[in-house]
C-alpha cells in the first residue's frame, strides 16, 4: 500500500482526520491531522506511535516522522472542509482565472455540488473544487 492509502484507512479508525501529508526530498514524512475540538500533543504522540509501527510492517521508507495539527491557517482540500468551515474567512488561489482574477480572500458562504461560493469585496464568486490550486483558512484575531 502507498502512504496515502495507509493514512486514509488508518486515521479515521483512530478518531482523526487526515488534513494533508508530505514526504520531503530529505525523507521527512509530515502528517497533518485534525479532530473535533483540536489536536493535542498526546494525540500527535498516539498517532506517531501507531503509524511508525504500521509503516515498519508495510515497509514504508522515511527518515523522520512528524505528526502535527494543521494550524489555525489549515489548508482546505475537500468539499467537506469547506462545508465544515462555512462562515469562516478563506484565501483561495485558483488554477485558472475567474473574471481575470486568481486570488480571492473572503468568507465561505457555501459548498454544494463541488462548487465553493465565496463572498469578497461586496461580490460573490463560485469556484469549482477542480479549479482550486490552494485554499487556506484565514484566522481572525480580535483584541
Image (spheres, helix red, strand yellow):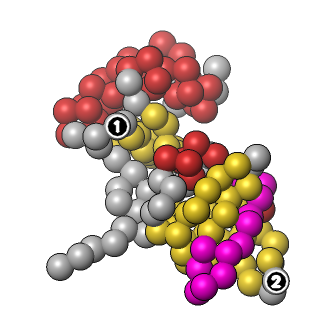
Residue 29 in view in this figure: no
Q: Position of residue 40 (x, y in %)?
A: 22, 40
Is mark 2 in CB contact (under 8 Å) with mark 1?
Answer: no
Mark 2: secondary structure: loop
Does the magenta-highlighted stretch encompass residue 117?
no
Query: Image point 20% across, 39% down: which residue?
Result: 41
Q: Quadrant of the N terminus?
A: top right
Residue 20 in view in this figure: yes
Magenta stretch, overall SS? strand
Query: Image point 60% across, 74% down: which residue?
Result: 119
Label 2 crowd (10 A; few <14 / some 14-19 / many >=20): few
Report whether 41 appears left or right of 9.
Answer: left
Does the magenta-highlighted stretch encompass residue 122?
yes
Q: Is residue 12 above or below residue 80?
A: above
Q: Position of residue 106 (x, y in %)?
A: 54, 75
Q: Which residue bears the numbered disc 1?
A: 36
Report whether 130 appears left or right of 78.
Answer: right
Label 1 crowd (10 A; few <14 / some 14-19 / many >=20): few
Numbered range of the magenta stretch:
119-130
Q: Which residue bears the numbered disc 2?
A: 99
Observer-nearest residue: 132 or 105?
Answer: 105
Observer-nearest residue: 58 or 113?
Answer: 113
Mark closest to the chain's N terminus, 2 or 1: 1
Q: Is residue 66 above or below residue 48?
A: below
Query: Image point 49% across, 47% down: which residue?
Result: 84
Amino acid at each position: 500500500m502507498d502512504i496515502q492509502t495507509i493514512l486514509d484507512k488508518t486515521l479515521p479508525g483512530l478518531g482523526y482526520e487526515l488534513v494533508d501529508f508530505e514526504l520531503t526530498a530529505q525523507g521527512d514524512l509530515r502528517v497533518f491531522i485534525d479532530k473535533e475540538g483540536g489536536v493535542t500533543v498526546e494525540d500527535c504522540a498516539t498517532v506517531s506511535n501507531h503509524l511508525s509501527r504500521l509503516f515498519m510492517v508495510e515497509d514504508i521508507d522515511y527518515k523522520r516522522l512528524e505528526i502535527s495539527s494543521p494550524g489555525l491557517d489549515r489548508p482546505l482540500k475537500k468539499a467537506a472542509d469547506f462545508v465544515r468551515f462555512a462562515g469562516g474567512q478563506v484565501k483561495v488561489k485558483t488554477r485558472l482565472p475567474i473574471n481575470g482574477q486568481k486570488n480571492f480572500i473572503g468568507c465561505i458562504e457555501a459548498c454544494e455540488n463541488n462548487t465553493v461560493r465565496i463572498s469578497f469585496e461586496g461580490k460573490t464568486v463560485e469556484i469549482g473544487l477542480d479549479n482550486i490550486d490552494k485554499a487556506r483558512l484565514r484566522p481572525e484575531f480580535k483584541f
